[in-house]
């Protein structure tokens, strides 16, 4: 599903995704209110696997829409597709559960690759957004409690994920199986009480788990 108020940009996305054999653009809407009404009235089989969501929408904004998407379609992945690179928007979108954050300045090839990455279980971040998360985002953080601490291997996995590596690339780097990486990722998410990679990186910084975030 695409939620985007520009008819011209919707046509571009429609045409681009129409050439992708593994992606079907089932619905597109110009406002969040109509899109949410569609989700609310959809049967389980009609709920999309992924939603591309603009932030600057008429009426309800993309950030205001995210919690409602999670309510009506909790298993649906959301990629923010926007012109905004504001730090506040990035942090809020990730904290609300967005699995990806891409800028419209990306190429269409990068967009389709980002969709595939998210559907393969990864996270899709614009390079500038990833840099922000790893750099600007870390602030003075409270000391992590024992329940939040990660093992050495889990920290290695999380550090590589924060660099934008996918599970297979992490496995190759650490000389372990992709399945083992997946198990580590599940444990990381459980310990940090998150459900995607950007949120895990954000929370790890917040709790001071990365050594360079500690004073």
Image (cartoon, rainbow, N blue to C red):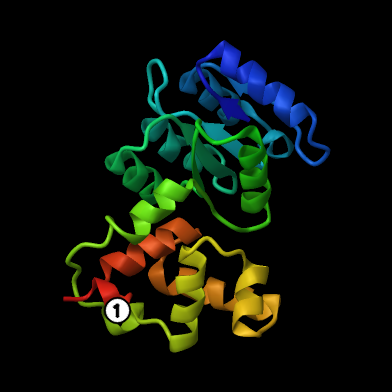
Report the residue at 34% width, 52% height from top. Answer: 132
Q: Identify the residue at image location x=33%, y=47%.
A: 91
For image coordinates 60% across by 83% down, the residue present is: 174
Q: Secondary structure at mark 1?
A: helix
Q: How far across and down, in percent of the image, does residue 71 sit?
A: 48, 41
Task: Look at the image and tell me whether residue 144 can be seen.
Answer: yes
Is 151 located above or below residue 87 in the figure? below
- Judge left or right: residue 135 versus residue 158: left
Dividing the picture into quadrants, the one containing residue 29 is top right
- Identify which residue, 193 or 28, lies in the foreground: 28
State whether residue 25 appears in this view.
no
As rendered, which of 185 and 106 lies closer to the eye? 106
The residue labelled by disc 1 is 211
Image location of residue 31, percent across then percent down: 49, 18
Q: Is 35 situated left or right of 96 in this image?
A: right
Which residue is outermost to the right?
Answer: 21
């Amino acid at each position: 599903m695409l939620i985007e108020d520009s008819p011209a940009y919707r046509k571009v996305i429609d045409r681009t995704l129409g050439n992708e054999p593994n992606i079907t653009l089932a619905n597109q809407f110009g406002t969040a209110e109509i899109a949410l009404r569609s989700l609310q009235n959809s049967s389980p089989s009609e709920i999309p696997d992924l939603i591309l969501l603009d932030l600057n929408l008429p009426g309800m904004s993309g950030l205001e829409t995210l919690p409602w998407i999670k309510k009506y379609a909790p298993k649906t992945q959301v990629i923010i597709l926007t012109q905004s690179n504001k730090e506040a928007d990035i942090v809020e979108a990730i904290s609300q559960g967005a699995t990806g954050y891409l800028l419209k300045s990306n190429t269409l090839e990068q967009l389709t690759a980002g969709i595939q990455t998210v559907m393969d279980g990864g996270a899709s971040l614009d390079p500038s957004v990833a840099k922000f998360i790893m750099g600007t985002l870390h602030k003075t953080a409270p000391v992590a409690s024992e329940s939040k601490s990660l093992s050495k291997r889990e920290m290695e996995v999380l550090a590589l994920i924060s660099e934008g590596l996918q599970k297979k690339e992490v496995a190759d780097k650490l000389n372990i199986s992709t399945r083992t990486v997946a198990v580590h990722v599940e444990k990381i998410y459980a310990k940090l009480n998150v459900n995607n990679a950007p949120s895990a990186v954000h929370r790890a910084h917040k709790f001071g788990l990365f050594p360079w975030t500690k004073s």
